Amino acid sequence: MSKKIKKKSTFIDMTAMSDVTVLLLTFFMLTATFVQKEPVQVNPPQSVSEIKIPETNIVSVLVEPNGKVYMSLDKQPDRWEVLQKMGEHYGITFTDEELKKFSLLSSFGAPINVMKEFLALPTDKQDKEIVNLGIPCDSTNNQFREWMRYAKIVNRDLVIAIKADGGTPYPLVKDIMETLQELKEYRYNLITSLKNAPEI
């Protein structure tokens, strides 16, 4: 006569595991820093430098391969005030609604004369349109210089960071640097991607 073996319960209490998961998820959400959306994809050149730029009071200058220039300021009040000053300089009056919309942009890059039309576009159309625009930075119409001048007037503590694509011709980046020199801005950071240092 054979005895029946009692089956043991296979139930595993997962309460502790789900508690740990929720705690980890909360930790990562609260400590994460969000990367700002950039108007164009830029692959910066590589370097072995590990110097980090500050996380606040940054004005970023983005130069894509064809030389189009875009900028971003990390503080909303700075963006509001800079656009207001640019409007005064070029004789354009921006409404509070337009100033608010501009202050919510993570990056900007449109000639000042089309800025009102650009801000009137829905967000998804702005993302498509900005790729074709860019801030003028040539000798006859250097609006980049004015944006940078007013940005530094609004916030004197701004750190300048230039991020250019590895394929951007040097003369285009040089124009940006010369414009900064005209404004007596001799200190700026060049953003690069990290590569491994050669072993000795």
Image (cartoon, rainbow, N blue to C red):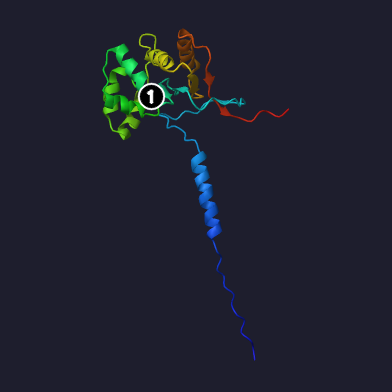
Compared across the picture, whether 91 is left or right of 30 comes to: left
The percent coordinates of residue 51 (x first, y second) are: 59, 25
Q: Position of residue 43 (x, y in %)?
A: 50, 28
Quarter of the image with the C terminus in it: top right
Label 1, on which residue?
77
Expressed as whole percent of the image width and height from the top left, the position of residue 174 reads 49, 13
Position of 107 relative to 82 (above/below): below
Please name the residue shown 49% across and 35% down the image. 33
Would residue 115 appear left or right of 53 to someone viewing this image?
left
Q: Is residue 28 left or right of residue 106?
A: right
Residue 15 point in image, percent of width and height: 53, 60
What residue is drawn where x is 52% and y is 17%? 188
Name above or below for residue 159 compared with residue 22: above
The answer to whether any part of residue 109 appears in the image is no
Which quarter of the image is occupied by the N terminus? bottom right
At a point 61% along the width and 84% down the height, the residue shown is: 4
